[in-house]
Amino acid sequence: MRIGELAERTGASTRSLRYYEQRGLLASERAANGYREYGAEAVERVRNIRLLLESGLTSQDIRELRACLELDLVREPDCAEALALYEQRLQAVRERIDALSATEQRLERRLAERAQT
């Protein structure tokens, strides 16, 4: 299938599909006329890429999960690599939240100090 059909079947823009290809997440063959051609398995792969991006993973993270991209991660979310990566990213998010909360408290104190003067 060509890029427009893949975009239509997955809800991804053609720009996103080209980006996934540039990042090594998706592969295509070139037809004689130079158009990108994708196999039927690309539909599931793109759906998984979008699911993982929406879950907060980066394209770099997703590249580490290449083996999981052929599974149906909605119905079979048991890809051990994906679960481990979710846990790592969740811990990083929690650490970032803690750091931002500490910054918020410092800023609030500074503003309160300025309001008293």
Image: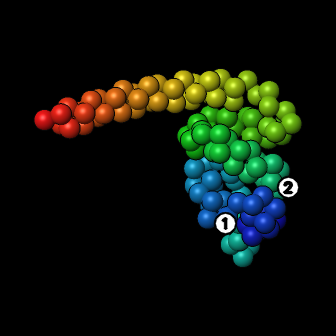
Disc 1 marks which amino acid?
A: Thr
Q: Position of residue 59 (x, y in %)?
A: 58, 44
Is there CB contact under 8 Å for labels 2 and 1? no
Label 2 sits on a secondary structure element that is loop
As drawn, the residue found furthest toward the left would be 117
Report which quarter residue 53 is drawn in: top right
Callout 2: 10 Å neighbours few (<14), some, many (20+)? few
Residue 24 to residue 78: above or below: below
* Res. 69 image quadrant: top right
At a point 71% along the width and 71% down the height, the residue shown is 35
- Please indicate whether residue 85 sits to the left or right of residue 99 in the image: right
Q: Nearer the viewer, residue 45 or 111?
A: 111
Identify the residue under disc 1.
Answer: 14
Amino acid type, residue under disc 2 in the picture: Ala
* Gap in angstroms between the C-alphas marked 2 and 1: 16 Å
Q: State the residue in front, 114 or 103.
A: 114
Classify mark 1: helix, strand or loop: helix
Name the front one of labels 2 and 1: 1
Q: Residues within 10 Å of mark 1 (few under 14, many from 20)?
A: some
Residue 1, x across and y down, in percent:
82, 65
48 left or right of 24?
right
Q: Residue at x 13, y 35 (%)?
A: 117
Residue 5 in view in this figure: yes
The residue positioned 61% from the left and 65% from the top of the image is 15
The furthest residue to the bottom: 33
The percent coordinates of residue 72 (x first, y second) are 83, 40
Q: Which residue is mark 2?
A: 40
